[in-house]
Amino acid sequence: MAHALVIAKAKVDGDPNYNSYRRGYKIRPIVDRLLETTGIDLSAGGGVPELMRFQEHFKESRVVVFGGLNCEDIYFDGHVESEKRIDLLYDDVWKHYHVINSLTGVQTRRYV
């Protein structure tokens, strides 16, 4: 969860390290610092309570997590008024979060 949030936040903010984070470079210290700063423990996984705490930390961005490729299946919505939006897809089978770069792309994949 934290890994996906860092990558998505870097994309939204135009961070020059976005591609490095996406490929797995330089991201571990950032994720560790985020978890230390927020005090969130993800050793048992992360769900809505952890997402709520991350939303409190990322006040300037709206965190939205979809439960499937259907964009109406919203797992979590931070309800923050912001143009910056972090979209994640939660894979219930693997218990994993993925960054959504384009909601249009998700809709297209759904029909392919």
Image (spheres, rainbow, N blue to C red):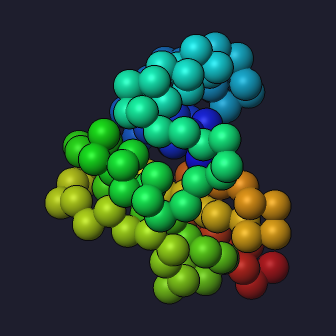
Residue 28 position by quadrant: top right
Q: Position of residue 4 (x, y in %)?
A: 59, 43
Residue 69 position by quadrant: bottom right
The quadrant of the image that shows the C terminus is bottom right
Q: Is residue 87 left or right of residue 83?
A: right
For this rendering, which residue is in front, 112 or 56? 56
For this rendering, which residue is in front, 55 or 98? 55
Q: Is residue 10 left or right of residue 28?
A: left
Kindly identify the residue that appears in the image at 64 percent across and 69 percent down: 106
How many numbered markers are drawn? Answer: 0
Kindly identify the residue that appears in the image at 73 percent across and 70 percent down: 92
Q: Is residue 11 visible?
A: no
Q: Position of residue 98 (x, y in %)?
A: 66, 53
6 versus 100 height, above or below: above
19 versus 58 height, above or below: above
Kindly identify the residue that appears in the image at 72 percent across and 65 percent down: 91
Q: Is residue 3 left or right of residue 15?
A: right
Residue 20 position by quadrant: top right
For this rendering, which residue is in front, 45 or 70? 45
Residue sitting farthest toward the left: 81
29 versus 82 height, above or below: above
Q: Position of residue 85 (x, y in %)?
A: 36, 53
11 versus 68 height, above or below: above
Q: Is residue 83 visible?
A: yes
